[in-house]
Amino acid sequence: MVTHPWRSPSQEELLPSGSAGIAMHEYAEDSQVAKDRSRIEEQPSDGVEAGASHATINDYGEGTSSGQVTDSSDTPLMPAYRVYRRRWFGLAQLVLLNIIVSWNWLTFSPVSTTSAQFFGVSESAINWLSTAFLFAFCVVSPVVIWTLNKGGPKPAIVTSSIFVLAGNWIRYGGTRASPPRFGVVMFGQVLIGLAQPFVLAAPTRYSDLWFTDRGRISATAIASLANPFGGALGQLVDPFLATKPSDMPNMVLIVAIIASVASLPSFVIPGRPPTPPSASAAQTKMPLRQAIRTVVKAIDFWLLFIPFSIYVGLFNSISSLLNQILSPYGFSETEAGICGALLIIVGLVASAVTSPLIDKYKFFLAAIKLLVPIIAICYLVFIFAPPTRTVAAPYVIASILGASCFSLVPVALEWLVEISHPVSPEFSSTVCWTGGQLLGACFILIEDALRDGSTPQTPGKGREWWPQGNLQRALIFQAVIAAVGVPLALCIGLWGEENSGGFWGMFKGKSVGKRLAVDLHRDSTSGIVRRSSASEEEQVNV
């Protein structure tokens, strides 16, 4: 009899008795899982002909299309896990959508002065285009969790594409109307805001579904950090597309065309792999109600959730207000846009270096505790950058800030999944992103209210350092809030199951969470010898 790996392995199969730091749960399969098993068993996997279900296995014991390793007497030994080349198509689509959604978010912020002139509104009203976008994320988050939990990444990606298509063309209609309809543009912006959580919260779920522990952080990083890359494109490209108010409709049209092209492949990407990539992926995930109770009681979750939300919120606010932060000191929209692009592009390069290293060596906590203080210091030092009135200081500090923030995001998201396993990955991811978007919207409103309100008739003292309309008090607010997250992050791992020798113990050796422990134990009990990431990937790439 053939047993398919999309079952829930029992505790005895996965862990030796008395394994410290791992609390496993057994759950009964629901009818949907049984249906999926029946459906998958009838389908051959990539590169394996139908009817060849017991034909071959590779050196790792991972290759039987039946989903289980067998010996010469056809006796079941261990479940087989494999990855598929098709996983890259879905990952590429997640990347495209995250890029375009973030570009949509920051369409008007890099050219806030020009946008305000075009619509005949204040710059504070233009800020609401970003703020409403973030609030829309929070409103739809419960639906996102349900969609990813019940349907997986594909339904979420398709839903996001529909909102992106509708929102972009509604925005274009608002700019083409005579006179321009700011309310219509706002409505389109909110629709795109509803699209964002479906793709921003999906990477951890997608990497858990399609990738092994050797590639999960890198996959999460690629998809998650594509989102701020879209913001970088907006910061860099939009000031060139809209040099004067009359250019605004054409700029929105160009973005809408790009968004349409990026959205259409969503409808043809694969839904889920025929067989799971790892032992942890094969486990039945915890029901949502029980997941909520489990996460609420986890101290380490809160110790990371709060700093993560703070730094995402601060990043959202500084990205939205960067032009308004720099312009009172004589910086042009183009110079501010380059600063915003450096903030993101340097961060992407840094993450491309750090993510594979952390993927290989598993230094989750050491990375988190190193990066968080650097981020807080950058926000403190940035207070003094605009008054220099030269591009060097803002550019250098923004680059360091971006490198630190972008290196932190995928590590934090994956560690949250590790410590909350077997809670489904989309739960912790969506909750954390929602916290960041909510704080981001609040920070934008607060920082806009802290804008200097002096007039030329009442210049005040020190106008060369505090010019009219400056946001220096907002920068001080950012530095204070950034400092709040540091002690919380440094306390991660001091209590609970992940304790590994106190504060300094967090910097020694690998950080092994519950999910990774399941995969490592499966490898040891099945006799799999781990090689380098490249060679291992080649062995199971089908």
Image: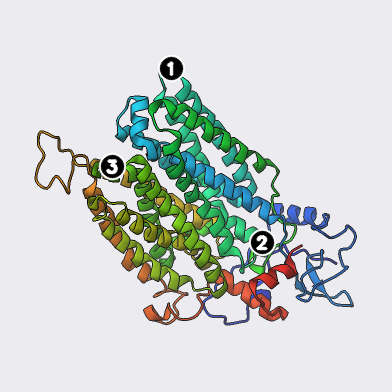
Question: Residue 174, how many percent across, how many down?
Answer: 46, 24
Circle 3: residue type: Ser
Residue picked out by circle 3: 327
Q: Which type of secondary structure does the marked residue at label 1 adopt?
A: loop
Indicate whether 196 appears above or below 397: above
Q: Give the CA separation, mark 1 to mark 3.
A: 30 Å
Quarter-wise, where is residue 55 in the image? bottom right
- Mark 3 packing: few (<14 Cα in 10 Å), some, or many (20+)? some
Amino acid marked by disc 2: Ala
Q: Are marks 1 and 3 in contact (CB under 8 Å)?
A: no
From what the image shows, is residue 140 above or below residue 392?
above
Residue drawn at the location 79% of the way across and 53% of the way down: 39
Q: How far separated are the C-alphas under marks 2 and 1? A: 60 Å
Residue density around tag 2, few if under 14, some if 14–19, many if 20 or more, within 10 Å: few
Q: Is residue 136 above or below residue 428?
A: above
Q: Earlier in the sequence, mark 3 or mark 2?
A: 2
**Residue labelled with disc 1:** 178
The structure residue drawn at horizontal position 56% and vertical position 52%, both measured from the top left corner, is 202
The residue wearing badge 2 is 28
2 or 1: mark nearer the eye: 1
